Amino acid sequence: MAEKKRILIRAEKLKKEAVMVKAISKFFKRQHPYTVAFYIGRKNTQRILDCKIQKKSKLLASKED
């Protein structure tokens, strides 16, 4: 009985690991991966990193001026 329970617990852990690996590999397969701001939100990212997130086009336009 204990052996069967141990096997079931191990199987659950392997499933969780497979899901994580699949999610991470899917992220890196993209030609243009999503940013951190996409996953946790722009405002949360700004608060965590203590920075201001701007669109690339606006950033380049402000540098040209």
Image: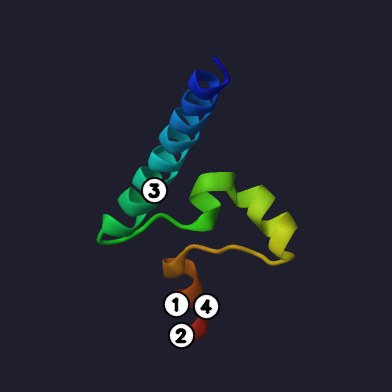
User: Mark 3 or mark 4, which is nearer the start of the sequence?
Assistant: 3
Q: Residues within 10 Å of mark 4 (few under 14, many from 20)?
A: few
Residue on which the image places disc 4: 62
In contact (CB < 8 Å): disc 4 and disc 2: yes
Asked if the residues shown at circle 2 and circle 1 are in contact, with their CB atoms under 8 angstroms apart, the answer is yes
Q: Give whichever of discs 3 and 1 has the lower sequence position.
A: 3
Residue under label 3: 21
Q: CA distance from mark 3 to mark 1?
A: 36 Å
Q: Is residue 65 visible?
A: no
Q: Are marks 3 and 1 in contact (CB under 8 Å)?
A: no
Residue 64, numbered label: 2
Residue 49 visible in the displayed image: yes
Q: Which kind of residue does numbered mark 4 sit on?
A: Ser
Q: Quadrant of residue 29?
A: bottom left
Q: Amino acid at mark 3?
A: Val
- Viewport quadrant of the N terminus: top right
Quote the CA–CA distance across marks 4 and 3.
Answer: 39 Å
Q: Looking at the rendered structure, which numbered label has been put on residue 60?
A: 1
Is 56 left, or right, of 45 in this rendering? left
Q: Are marks 1 and 4 in contact (CB under 8 Å)?
A: yes
Where is residue 15 shown, x and y percent of the image?
A: 42, 33
Q: Nearer the viewer, residue 48 or 43?
A: 48
> Which residue is depicted at the point 64% across and 55% down?
45
CA distance for labels 4 and 2: 5 Å
Q: CA distance from mark 1 to mark 4?
A: 5 Å
